């Protein structure tokens, strides 16, 4: 009987479950490799969810996540499972699956003792999965390799079992084969988790220490904080303290998720659950922080805490200027649920009032943008994403540049830019192409390994700015969609960077300024001026479009003057129609932005900027 | 052909709104300063040209029920309606100008045109020195037919010459022989008619030299009036479909601008001066007074299917209406004793103002700056500075376009009315 009966169940009640009966694990998988379907199947088999109440992909809460097939926020579900004569409490901790959320992934992993490495039997492992696998191995998690979707005709379990065995060590025969869709092999997997994942270890008598691995804002309950208790225990009505901020809160509610919240008498060593303190902002309950008991505080916090640091910046502007207050309110609301989101008001000559927003990465950017547009019904223009530069002037003044148009003009001693360690998995036939791309993007090769006969892992350090541009799209298109990419930040480096400004009739258009490597300045200038020439309508006068580095013009295009704007015929029967045409043209003027005396349709900004931010498509079209 | 505008219904008896005929600001009704013009639309052609979006039909397209033979009688029914409606409003007066357009008016026998003109004379009377024009195709007139028109009271004929280049005429699907032009001009002058030649420039395949040759041909005839229009390819025409399918390349606006400048240069050098954006005449007396009436905002009535009419009110606004488009429906309504009006618009002050500026600025006599509002007047200096309005004329209180301004007239109108 996989589902324990009442007598056994009594032994695995929250707050009073012996650590040796607890198994904490997560699932590491690529976006479309079937993690959610497998999780659903586990919820069903363990009786946590009735089959008929089963919503497809129960764990992905937000609509946007369901639609995109990705999980942004992790949660933890407690499931009972019986093996032999013993009942166990299994905590499945969901992990975000994308590069931008590496820190959150690392905290989720830190809450587990084991990880299911789930790989599509028709596709093999992807770069992000590999990166997370390495992360799990560094955390000394017990890895259980599993091939999913073995029901697919295209499945090649032998080939990929070998690949997985090669990665985690062991025999290909030990790689489990399941189908989340049919349920085949899932019971065996649950048994394997109980058997292989070590039980948590902690000191029940020590002062309480629990690690926050997620923090979610709920409109009705305020912030819901997910924790893993390491030492001691947490109980309702106690006062708790956040060790990084020393802030104290009353524990209004404590419980476990199974799969809906169930309040409990508390949480003991090794247990996973949620806390509600009534705080309204996730910043007061930070992922990675340690929760302790105010009356009997721990001396030392658990390790591994760090503040989320925005890596990519973009200007967000409402297309309709009167939406600015609505955008501010929307950002204020999103911020409650997103500790990594930060923003400051900014004014652009070209785009009006908006915000400079910092993100963890491109996917984070796109998710925020999409939520703003969908949940708050805003039409936005976002400027091309850029990274943060540390600029040291000749007089040793240091300037942090988050907006290219603010790049200082004077004498510069040094510019430092963020660098990432990138892992790229590609079929071996594309190795040359991928190396060429990385080379173009100022990459330095760190190593290369064959995962199997026809799959190669390439490791590079690359400037983040190069990835933010359109690296991912290029990688996909040059490898016919087969390569996958993961990266993590890895410090910074000095680089020969310059600011390229775009000028319309001598007026700088701030929204189009970019910081690029000196050798690429010309290419960027030619690209942007040519693009703008196509987009900017002819005016009554000639409009020079220039790209300049400092005072030096590096590229130039000209929109020739409009010579004819008159309807030749205007007799009795034409007057009404002609008047209406003029009225319409006058109406159209209202959708124009003036840059100096040049009228530029707002749509032109969107067109010019959107094609530039193509790198932000990162999160989409992951399917091969 | 362009769709009719959206409007409100025209009453069955075609009556004008009462305020149109109402008293002025001082409460006293007074006679109109401007003249009354009459346009007669003749909706027939022998073939339909590929670029044409006018309301016109070939015999084959029309079928039975609205034949050319009965058209004069049908048109005269509307003339009768016009007389009743204007009379009721106290606005009937002798006609200053009459203009037969189309279509091809000369598809009708000269005697039919004469009959309609006779009907107009009977209903309204012709003012002393009235101008009576008909459009004509060079291949649909003879010395005799032109004689008949002159005898009936026509004073002016406007030939649709379009181009002197055979390949351009072929693209336009015009059937006339360009070699005929000097002949028809001579015949018309011998009959005592003033002559205008109409040209089209910017046809796909027309070179600058083709255009120069057309202008030179026109000048060689010694006519006193020329109209020159940039080709506009309207949606719904055969040419529009040809452009869409890539069979023809759309005329380039720069090319059209260059050709306009060439036309103005050659015509001016030959003593023909612009008096409207697309019209040149030897002197003010040779300008087409009927068309001037449109641009000056005078009253005019359009007879015929799809024709527009306009009557201004004492407050500077006015009413415009348009007839149903199909000749058969048009004939049926009139036979029923009902107005053929399909819809009308009662102009708001703002719309009337825009029209006044839009039309007035097209004329060399210019627009009285007093007509403009505060913002419009403020825009004048900038337009002069940018070389779009004539500085001397502006100082004298008129907005007059420069050569460059004529090519950008719509932009000027938008600025003057922003």
Image (cartoon, coloured by chain):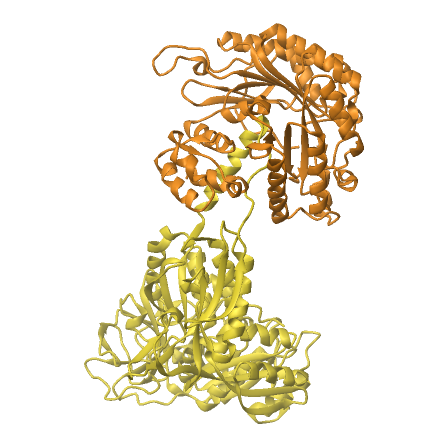
Chain colours: A yellow, B orange
Any part of residue B194 in sight: yes
Coordinates of residue A365 in the picture (x, y in percent) = 44, 68
Q: Quarter of the image holding residue B394?
A: top left
Left or right, residue A207 beside residue B310: left
Q: Nearer the viewer, residue B236 or B159?
A: B159
Residue A286 lies, with reference to residue B13, above or below; the image says below
Q: Nearer the viewer, residue B318 or A54?
A: B318
Residue A488 lies, with reference to residue B133, above or below; the image says below
Residue that appears at 37% across and 37% down: B377
Quarter of the image with the N terminus of chain B in it: top right
Residue B170 lies, with reference to residue A160, above or below; the image says above
Coordinates of residue A342 in the picture (x, y in percent) = 34, 69
Residue sitting farthest toward the left = A295
Residue that appears at 34% across and 35% down: B374
Coordinates of residue A191 in the picture (x, y in percent) = 53, 83
Any part of residue A238 in sight: no
Left or right, residue A67 beside residue A321: right
Q: Quarter of the image holding residue A326?
A: bottom left
């Amino acid at each position: 009987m996989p589902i324990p009966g009442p007598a056994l169940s009594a032994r695995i009640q929250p707050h009073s479950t012996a650590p040796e009966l607890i198994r904490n694990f997560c699932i590491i998988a690529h976006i479309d490799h079937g993690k959610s379907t497998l999780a659903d199947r586990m919820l069903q088999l363990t009786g946590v969810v009735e089959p008929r109440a089963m919503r497809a992909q129960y764990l992905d809460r937000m609509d946007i996540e369901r639609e995109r097939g990705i999980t942004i926020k992790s949660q933890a579900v407690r499931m009972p499972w019986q093996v032999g004569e013993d009942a166990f409490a299994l905590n499945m901790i969901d992990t975000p699956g994308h590069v931008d959320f590496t820190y959150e992934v690392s905290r989720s992993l830190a809450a587990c003792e084991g990880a299911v490495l789930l790989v599509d039997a028709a596709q093999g492992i992807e770069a992000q999965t590999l990166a997370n696998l390495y992360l799990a191995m560094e955390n000394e998690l017990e890895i259980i390799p599993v091939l999913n979707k073995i029901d697919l005709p295209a499945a090649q379990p032998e080939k990929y079992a070998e690949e997985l065995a090669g990665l985690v060590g062991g025999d290909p025969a030990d790689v489990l084969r399941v189908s989340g869709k049919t349920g085949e092999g899932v019971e065996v997997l649950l048994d394997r988790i109980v058997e292989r994942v070590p039980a948590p270890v902690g000191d029940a008598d020590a002062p309480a220490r629990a690690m926050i691995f997620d923090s979610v804002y709920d409109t009705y309950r305020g912030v819901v904080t997910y924790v893993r208790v390491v030492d001691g225990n947490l109980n309702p009505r106690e006062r708790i303290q956040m060790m990084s901020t020393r802030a104290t809160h009353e524990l209004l509610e404590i419980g476990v998720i199974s799969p809906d919240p169930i309040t409990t008498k508390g949480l003991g060593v090794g247990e996973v659950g949620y806390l509600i303190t009534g705080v309204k902002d996730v910043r007061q309950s930070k992922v990675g922080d340690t929760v302790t008991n105010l009356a009997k505080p721990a001396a030392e916090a658990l390790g591994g805490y760090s503040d989320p640091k925005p890596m990519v910046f973009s200007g967000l502007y409402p297309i309709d200027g009167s939406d600015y207050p609505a955008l501010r309110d929307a950002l204020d609301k999103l911020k409650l649920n997103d500790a990594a989101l930060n923003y400051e008001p900014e004014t652009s000559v070209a785009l009006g009032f908006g915000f400079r927003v910092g993100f963890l990465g491109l996917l984070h950017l796109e998710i925020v943008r999409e939520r703003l547009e969908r949940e708050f019904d805003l039409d936005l223009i976002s400027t091309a994403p850029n990274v943060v530069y540390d600029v040291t002037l000749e007089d040793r003044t240091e300037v942090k540049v988050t907006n290219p148009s603010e790049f200082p003009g004077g004498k510069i001693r040094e510019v430092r830019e963020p660098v990432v360690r990138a892992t790229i998995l590609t079929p071996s036939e594309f190795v040359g192409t991928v190396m060429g791309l990385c080379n173009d993007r100022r990459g330095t090769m760190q190593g290369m390994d064959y995962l199997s006969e026809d799959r190669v892992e390439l490791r590079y350090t690359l400037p983040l700015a190069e990835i933010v541009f359109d690296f991912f799209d290029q990688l996909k298109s040059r490898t016919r969609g087969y390569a996958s990419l993961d990266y993590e930040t890895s410090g910074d480096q000095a680089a020969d960077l310059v600011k390229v400004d775009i000028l319309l009739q001598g007026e700088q258009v701030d929204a189009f300024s970019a910081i690029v490597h000196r050798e690429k300045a010309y290419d960027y200038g030619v690209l942007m001026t040519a693009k703008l020439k196509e987009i900017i309508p002819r005016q009554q006068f000639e409009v020079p479009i220039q790209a300049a580095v400092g005072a030096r013009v590096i590229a130039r295009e000209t929109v020739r003057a409009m010579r004819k704007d008159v309807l030749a015929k205007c007799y009795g029967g034409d007057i009404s129609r002609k008047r209406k045409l003029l009225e319409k043209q006058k109406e159209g003027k209202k959708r124009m932005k003036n840059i100096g005396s040049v009228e530029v349709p707002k749509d032109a900004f969107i067109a010019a900027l959107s094609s530039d931010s193509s790198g932000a498509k990162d999160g989409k079209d992951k399917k091969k | 052909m362009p769709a009719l505008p959206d409007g409100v219904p025209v009453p069955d008896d075609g009556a004008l709104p009462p305020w149109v005929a109402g008293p002025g600001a001082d409460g006293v009704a007074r006679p109109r300063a401007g003249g009354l013009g009459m346009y007669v639309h003749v909706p027939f052609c022998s073939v339909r040209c590929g670029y044409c979006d006018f309301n016109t039909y070939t015999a084959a397209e029309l079928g039975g029920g609205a034949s050319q033979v009965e058209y004069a009688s049908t048109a005269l029914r509307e003339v009768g309606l016009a007389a009743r409606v204007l009379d009721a409003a106290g606005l009937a007066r002798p006609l200053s100008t009459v203009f037969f357009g189309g279509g091809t008016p000369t598809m009708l026998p000269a005697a039919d045109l004469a009959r309609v003109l006779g009907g107009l004379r009977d209903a309204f009377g012709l003012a002393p020195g009235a101008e009576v024009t008909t459009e004509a195709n060079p291949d649909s007139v003879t010395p005799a037919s032109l004689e008949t028109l002159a005898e009936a009271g026509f004073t002016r004929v406007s030939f649709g010459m379009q181009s002197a280049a055979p390949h351009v005429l072929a693209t336009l699907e015009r059937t006339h022989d360009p070699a005929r032009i000097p002949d028809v001009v001579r015949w018309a002058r011998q009959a005592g008619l003033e002559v205008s030649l109409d040209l089209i420039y910017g046809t796909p395949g027309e070179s600058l030299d083709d255009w120069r040759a057309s202008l030179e041909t026109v000048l060689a005839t010694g006519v006193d009036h020329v109209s020159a229009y940039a080709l506009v390819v309207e949606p719904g025409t055969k040419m529009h479909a040809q452009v869409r399918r890539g069979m023809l390349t759309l005329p380039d606006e720069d090319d059209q601008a260059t050709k306009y400048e060439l036309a103005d240069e050659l015509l001016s050098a030959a003593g023909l001066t612009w008096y409207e954006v697309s019209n040149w005449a030897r002197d003010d007396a040779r300008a087409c007074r009927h068309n001037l009436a449109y641009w000056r905002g005078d009253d005019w009535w359009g007879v015929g299917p799809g024709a527009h009419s306009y009557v201004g009110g004492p407050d500077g606004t006015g009413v415009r209406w348009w007839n149903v488009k199909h000749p058969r429906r048009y004939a049926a309504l009139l036979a029923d004793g009902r107005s053929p009006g399909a819809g009308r618009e009662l102009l708001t002050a703002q719309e009337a103002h825009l029209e006044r500026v839009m039309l007035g600025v097209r004329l060399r006599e210019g627009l009285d700056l007093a007509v403009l509002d505060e913002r419009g007047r403020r825009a004048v200096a900038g337009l002069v500075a940018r070389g779009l309005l004539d500085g001397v004329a502006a100082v004298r209180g008129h907005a007059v376009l420069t050569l460059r301004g004529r090519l950008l007239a719509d932009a000027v109108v938008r600025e003057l009315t922003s």
